[in-house]
Image (tube, rainbow, N blue to C red):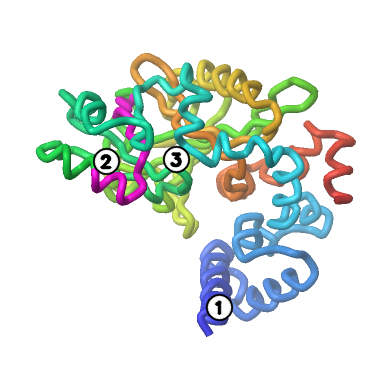
Amino acid sequence: MSRIKEVLDGFNTTVKIVKKKNPDKSKLYIAFDLFVNMLIYPISFPDYRKCNYINLTKEEKKQCITKEEYKRFVYYMDDEKYRNVFLDKSIFDKTFKDFIGRDYIDLRECSLDEFKSFIQGKQSVFAKVLDEFGGHGISKIKDFSNPEQLYETLKENKQFLIEDTIVQHDELNRINPYAVNNVRFSTVVKDGQVYVVTRTLRLNTGNDPVISSNDVMVNVDEEGNLISDAIDEMFETYEKHPDTNAQIKGTKLPFIKEAEEMVKKAALRVPQVRYVGWDVGITPNGPLLIEGNFYPSYGLTQFYLLNPDYPLKRRLKAIMKEEYDLIEKK
């Protein structure tokens, strides 16, 4: 019964969102079009609304990657034997130690005394579950008054990875000082060359110190300019940050070219994982890696309100060429 409710909720939410952006179309027409498209194409509710299916021609729809197509692409590009580098945050930090720009410890490997030494003099640290995504299992720790209890609690919660707090650049603090706002770069490795597919700034809302599903997204060009309004998952757009009222579009982020060079170098460190979404923090001293995702959300790169050239398949084909045809046949 819960699955039926989940499907109905997804259907109704999609109709509501599409109606908001297409006021000239009736809800009945949108519901019918959604139903027909889901019969013809193997798409999900987010695919339909984020790709703007209601306004696409048949040929344009063929350039939008679906959930199943994306899964085939990722699993083709990313060797299963090497995915754990990105699935385990502690392994990631060790593998990319020269790119992460902060100290860390793994509670599975350190003693209580080593933990006490690590937190001594710090105002805060971040504790992370090793294999969670989307901001889940991450806590900002400020209270070190009882380190013995904290040590045991973190281990009980499986928050084994403890990292220094990242100090972000003033330009990002101006927009949103409550979280480490990050730029998501997606990269593809083809014949030993790294291609940057997308750059997306993610800004959190609600004074949450962790970037999560509540964030808003902004398109970033290769010079670091914010070239779109902020957009959330409900298709609401914001010219200014909803919490700080800071101007978004037209702002230029610092160190974007340096960040792009960094992710290109990082992408070749584990070349067996050829498609990665990199979360990059921008500090006063330059960029650093926060984490990498071997299965990054394709909603960021295939959102018509965010990326005017959004049909993701077309962009991947331009890089992969004949190899993409092999993936489609799998």
Residue sitting nearer the eye, 146 or 71: 146
Residue that badge 3 annotates: 202
Write the residue at 71% across / 38% down. 79
Residue that badge 1 annotates: 3
* x and y percentages locating residue 316 in the rendered image: 75, 38
Q: Is mark 3 on a helix, strand or loop?
A: strand
Residue sitting nearer the eye, 274 or 311: 274
Write the residue at 69% across / 61% down. 53
Write the residue at 49% across / 27% down. 225
User: Does residue 160 belong to the magenta stretch?
Assistant: yes
Left or right: 245, with 229 as reference point: left
Boundaries of the magenta span:
152-168
Q: Which amino acid does label 2 sit on?
A: Lys
Res. 146 image quadrant: top left
* x and y percentages locating residue 94 in the rendered image: 48, 25
* x and y percentages locating residue 272 in the rendered image: 70, 30
- Residue 298 in sight in this render: yes
